[in-house]
Amino acid sequence: MNNKKIWVAGHRGMVGSAIVRRLQQDDCDILTVSRQDCDLTDNAAVAEWVGDNKPDMVVLAAAKVGGILANDTYPVDFLYENLAIQNNVIRNSYDHGVEKLLFLGSSCIYPKLADQPITEDALLTGPLEPTNEWYAIAKIAGIKLCQAYMKQYGARFVSAMPTNLYGPHDNFNLETSHVIPALMRKAHRAKKAGENGMEIWGTGTPLREFLHVDDLADAAVYVLNNYEDMEHINIGSGTDLSISDVAKLVMEVVGLEGDLRHDLDKPDGTPRKLMSASKLRAIGWTPSIELRDGLMQTYEWFLEHVEN
């Protein structure tokens, strides 16, 4: 990657900003562009920008993202916008001679009831989780488009599927956020209000895997350097825990005392989602940030950049 121009599409998001931080450790030229200067849903704008800047490599981290409520409320936005973004970036990367592209998806691409831990070959073997299928379908299309370019043209376009992520620059809006930032915001509000404990959606029994976004960024750069297969590759921690357990851990980190209560009128989502990490381990990468340490760092960032 020395002296390469690497475009991080989506550099202002949680994932993209983490990848920029990671790439700053290497001897490369990092390219970024704001939405105001290049709307990634506009193919002509993307074609012009890529043609003018001529990146050697691309990390496609740009996406419209959100939790269960957002996916269920705005299905058109999640399907259409994500298809447009990835189609434009992937197509123009090939048209303008990009050497290698890494497309980042999501673990929601897998069937709702896939065998655990989920291996890469589970893709398209069963129905998706209905609460986020619109986003999942877009990400599956992105994987397949990269595979199609590799098959038809020999393009070095690979895909990686991160597990549930958390960390600095996350979305802490309770209406649209994912599990950990939503729990952290709830716990913080309850603490400020002097409440005893907090309430979470559902039974708390579903199992989830979490990875700090800085670990994801390190893995993404590692994959960009070391992975060439047509099949996508999972990026995860390889361990999971219940929503109740992670909520209690968040309460400890925030300093909220009291009990955890359950709103049983709200959905649980997928019963378990743990991705196999064996393929990634086989090429030599392992995570380094423990969950408690990562949560503490994330809460410090929240206090400085969101609360204040």
Image (cartoon, rainbow, N blue to C red):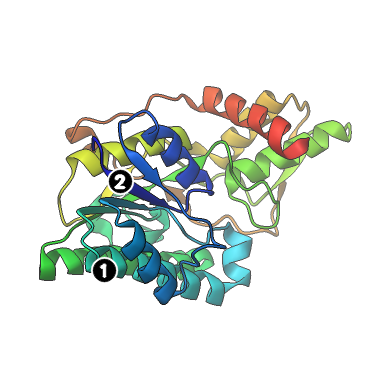
Q: Residues within 10 Å of mark 1 (few under 14, many from 20)?
A: many
> Image height check: is 165 above or below 104?
above
Q: Is residue 291 left or right of residue 224?
A: right
In the picture, residue 256 is in which quadrant?
top right
**Residue wearing tag 1:** 145
- Secondary structure category for the residue under label 2: strand
Q: Is residue 105 left or right of residue 171?
A: left
Residue 81 image label: none
Kind of residue at badge 2? Lys
Residue under the point 74% across and 44% down: 199
Q: Nearer the viewer, residue 33 or 214?
A: 33
In the picture, residue 90 is in which quadrant?
bottom left
Across and down, in percent, residue 191 comes to 82, 31
Q: Is residue 262 left or right of residue 168?
A: right
> Image height check: is 32 above or below 279?
below
Q: Residues within 10 Å of mark 2 (few under 14, many from 20)?
A: some
Give the Cα separation between the discs numbered 1 and 2: 23 Å
> Image height check: is 149 above or below 225?
below
Residue under the point 41% across and 72% down: 83
Across and down, in percent, residue 264 comes to 69, 54
Residue under the point 74% across and 41% down: 186
- Secondary structure category for the residue under label 1: helix
Kind of residue at badge 1? Leu
**Residue wearing tag 2:** 5
Across and down, in percent, residue 243 comes to 57, 41
Q: Residue furthest right?
A: 194
* Residue 71 in sight: yes
In the picture, residue 269 is in which quadrant?
bottom right
